[in-house]
Amino acid sequence: MSEGTLLVVSGPSGVGKSSVIDAVLAETNARFSVSATTRAPRSGEIDGVDYRFVGHGEFSDLVNSGGMLEWAEYGGHRYGTPRGPVLEILGAGTHVILDIENDGAHQVKRAYPASVLVFLMPPSRSELERRLRARGDTSAADIDRRLAVADEQMIDARDCYDHLVVNDDLEGAISQVVSILGDPAIPAADSAAFPHTGSGSPTRSNTE
């Protein structure tokens, strides 16, 4: 039995990452990795479904024993991807999808070099800004902050990710990620699978 693919999906706020991942999970046999966190459950959250809720001591034990593929701290709480459940699922021949930020993706790649990193790109920076403003629930200052973070993420992704997928059409982006799961081979850096800046806006990825 061949091992499943560990697919790491990242992307800036406003790019539609959750919609793409949910659809890929629905169309394939892939499983979503449940992260561990030291924060308390929020109303309606279920342990083992939304997160694996653990104490600070257990989280530290996992980190110190190499039991985390990646982890980070946000707002005084720690979040991470437990190694054991992911490797168990992969060993059974099932694909696993992680939804994490760039720093976590790099940690996963170092810990599990066979992982495949996919970054969802917006059609352009101006379109990303339009989507963020269209939400109507984000302050101008927060939008500026998110755009600055997105700029850094996209520069990093061009240098370090295995596949770049432009979400200018949701169904097309979903199809491309499903295709990558079926054939996760890493394209050459100068192939059409990598958008080029040219005029400053990425072109459509062509990984179908």
Image: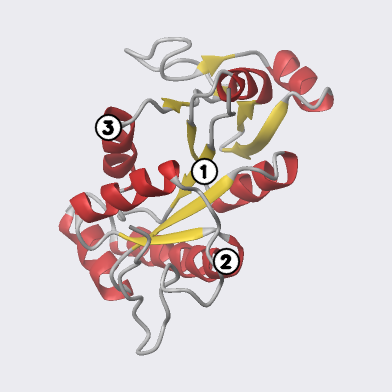
Q: At 49% across and 24% down in the image, what residue appears?
A: 94
Kindly identify the residue that appears in the image at 68 percent across and 33 percent down. Answer: 69
- Regarding mark 2 in the picture, which secondary structure is present there? helix
| Tag 1: amino acid | Val
Residue located beneath label 1 in the image: 8
Q: Residues within 10 Å of mark 2 (few under 14, many from 20)?
A: some
Residue 72's spot in the image, x, y percent? 64, 39
* Tag shown at residue 27: 3
Q: Does residue 150 appear to the left or right of 54 in the view shown?
A: left
Quadrant in which the C terminus is drawn:
bottom left
Residue type at mark 2?
A: Asp
Q: Secondary structure at mark 1?
A: strand
Check if mark 2's residue and mark 3's residue have beta carbons within 8 Å. no
**Which of the pair 138/30 is nearer the observer?**
30
Q: Residue furthest right?
A: 64
- In 3D space, how far apart are the residues under numbered discs 1 and 2 (Cα atoms)? 15 Å
